[in-house]
Amino acid sequence: MNGQNLKIFTPTSIGDTAWLRDLWLSEWGGEGMVSRGHVYHLQDLQALVAVDATGGYVGAATYRIDPAGDIELMSLNATTRGVGIGSKLLAEVEAIAARSGAGRVWLITSNDNLDAIRFYQRRGYRMVAVHIGAVDEARRLKPTIPLVGEHGIDIHDEIELAKQVG
Ligand SMILES: CC(C)(COP(=O)(O)OP(=O)(O)OC[C@H]1O[C@@H](n2cnc3c(N)ncnc32)[C@H](O)[C@@H]1OP(=O)(O)O)[C@@H](O)C(=O)NCCC(=O)NCCS
């Protein structure tokens, strides 16, 4: 697969939205996402899905426009890693942000997600805050958040990353 052959669009059909919901259930433990102490529900977010040349779903991004007019990226998933799906989805979210006049794109990831922290920094994102114990707090709102994450690392903290796009 090559990122060049992907089609990225806003989910509209029942099939698109069902796939996205299933992705959230399997990858994010439910239809709610906790960020900075707030629970956001999938149905209230903007979304993009990616399909490959065969029409199969291969990735998705969800985001919201925050009260300051910036875009918070709420989730980013690639069903196959390292073939350009995440990069293309992220670039599309940034293009939407730039077109809409948003100053920046920002996101939260957890302290164990070293792959994501690397991925975003390689794409110009800076760590703008570390919220100590924020995932422990979030787990009270969303008990499906695991205690142990990638690489066997205990999950406790939220890492906030941001990039200026406009
Ligand atoms: C983080 C995540 C979204 C990244 O998506 P991805 O599709 O694997 O990322 P990409 O393939 O675009 O880029 C990863 C690397 O593959 C390389 N790559 C890109 N296109 C490629 C291609 N056609 N062939 C081979 N490698 C390629 C990129 O150069 C990149 O390396 P770099 O960071 O050194 O530049 C993905 O790993 C994922 O779904 N993780 C689980 C969910 C998650 O943690 N999301 C982030 C928190 S919200």
Image (cartoon, rainbow, N blue to C red):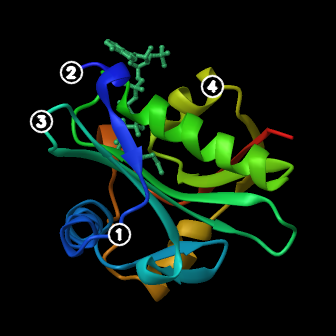
Q: Disc 2 to disc 3, how far (Cα)?
A: 10 Å
Q: Nearer the viewer, residue 40 or 109?
A: 40
Residue drawn at (58%, 34%), measured in percent from left and top? 91
Residue drawn at (67%, 40%), measured in percent from left and top? 95
Q: Is residue 86 visible?
A: yes
The correct choice, above or below, for 71 with respect to 92 in the image is below
Q: Percent position (x, y) of residue 158?
A: 61, 57
Q: Disc 1 to disc 4, how far (Cα)?
A: 29 Å
Label annotation for residue 47: none
The residue pinned by badge 1 equals 12
Circles 1 and 4: CB atoms closer than 8 Å? no
Q: Percent position (x, y) of residue 81?
A: 28, 29
Q: Residues within 10 Å of mark 1 (few under 14, many from 20)?
A: few
Q: Which marked residue is nearer to the observer: mark 1 or mark 4? A: 1
Question: Is 108 positioned to the left or the right of 140 in the image?
Answer: right
Circles 4 and 3: CB atoms closer than 8 Å? no
| Among numbered discs 2 and 1, the one appearing first in the sequence | 2
In the picture, residue 155 is in which quadrant? bottom left
Query: The disc labelled 1 sits on which kind of residue?
Result: Thr
